[in-house]
Amino acid sequence: MKKQFLAAIAAVTMVAAPAIAADYTITPMATGLNHPWSMAFLPDGRVLIAERAGRLRVLDKGKLGSISGVPKVYEKSQGGLFDVVLHPKFTDNGLIYLSYAAGTPSANATHIARAKLVGSALTDVKVIFTVSPTKNTPVHYGGRMAFLPDGTLLMTVGDGFDFREQAQKLESGLGKVIRITDTGAIPADNPFVNKPGASKATWSYGHRNEQGLAVDPVTGRVYESEHGPQGGDEINIIARGSNYGWPVATKGLDYSGATISPYKTYPGMKDAIVVWVPSIGPSGLAVYRGAMFKDWQGDLLTGALAIPQVKRIDMDANGKVIGQSRIFPEITERVRDVRVAPDGAIWISTDEDEGKVLRVTPK
Ligand SMILES: [Ca+2]
């Protein structure tokens, strides 16, 4: 009788608990990394990893090396080395782009440098974009980059925390998504190039601190995630010239608990497609278009810092959110970046003094 009972329990358990852990394998690829902020996959199989403190590492067949020639970064609080992305024609030109904080405590800003990667060295390093105005806070830099299908480059720029009103001001470069050419020039079709006094790199505005940016390679749709204040984290679909509300419209409160704005939504300003209350602290964002997790085509993957986890946002073909769920629950550290490798594996970096890079594949 007892044996039968236990067998029944076991059978029920097997049915009731989906064998999630059995569906994938998490493999540590590198450890001991200082706040690994971003990753980029080179065509030769090497993986670039940007550490916030200002080192660009390279993972080559399981061995960690370093890339020389990285510009000097301003490392303080949230400031440091941020994103690393490859030029769309990297195979032909070897160009990479780095975003980072640079300057002094009283005057610092998010920068973009372009360089040629030759072996393990950056050559021809050139700063091609600097956010203006500078600020005196070491936080809310934005710093995520992504190339659009037309070959121009987007980067997120945070509001600097103390300067949130500037997110609505077109003359300020803070609280924006910017768009430049691959050489740092202003594209002629940017939305505010003919508006007197406007910051001409601006592509969209009304942003707080955008820590995720990803372009769907199939639809061209641009997804961005940003931290709200207390509550009100968002994922937005970024459209040319649009206003995303901050700080006029938000679903969050100030850290004091005070109301920032009476408006949760506002006419003429775009609403987010995902809002998190309470805040999860969304970080690196990816659109899954890979061969390994076949059911996840077009879905969004995001890391989270404040409620540490990896999340999948289930999307339909029209870019509508169907639902969301935590994936890979064995990962309990603060997650800084999520990327899809060319082979379809999902790479994840953890935001710690001794950070890790993990690779997730189906079993
Ligand atoms: Ca918003």
Image (cartoon, rainbow, N blue to C red):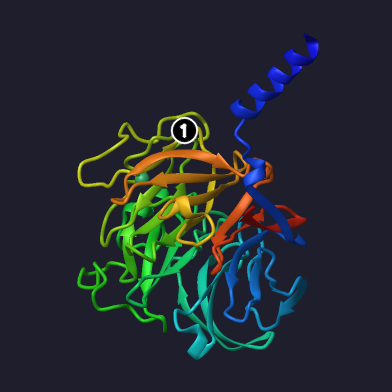
Q: Nearer the viewer, residue 166 or 151?
A: 151
Residue 61 occupies quadrant: bottom right
Q: Residue 214, relative to residue 250: is it above or below?
A: below
Q: Position of residue 52 (x, y in %)?
A: 66, 63
Q: Position of residue 89 (x, y in %)?
A: 45, 84
Q: Residue 37 or 265: which is nearer the viewer?
A: 37
Q: Judge from the rendering whether residue 4 lies leftward or rightward of residue 223; answer left or right.
A: right
Q: Residue at x 25, y 46 (%)?
A: 269
Count of marks overlaid on the render: 1
The residue beneath circle 1 is 277
Residue 171 in percent (x, y) is at 31, 63
The image quadrant where one finds the N terminus is top right
User: Residue at image x 50%, y 74%?
Assistant: 112
> What residue is at 69 percent from the left and 18 percent from the top?
8
Task: Please say if 299 is above or below 255.
Answer: below
> Quadrant location of residue 170?
bottom left
Does residue 297 appear in this view? yes
- Quadrant containing ligand 1 reads top left
Q: Secondary structure at mark 1?
A: loop
Residue 274 vertical position relative to residue 287 in the rendered view, above or below: above
Is residue 210 visible to the viewer in this orientation of the structure? no
Mark 1 surroundings: few (<14), some (14-19) or many (≥20) residues within 10 A: some
Residue 168 in the figure: left or right of residue 335: left
Q: Position of residue 151 (x, y in %)?
A: 36, 78
Q: Is mark 1 within 8 Å of ligand 1?
A: no
Look at the picture and state if 256 lies above or below 306. Answer: above
Left or right: 72 in relation to 232? right
Residue at 39% x, 52% y is 207
Closer to us: 213 or 30? 30
* Residue 96 location, quadrant: bottom right
Label 1 is placed on what type of residue?
Val
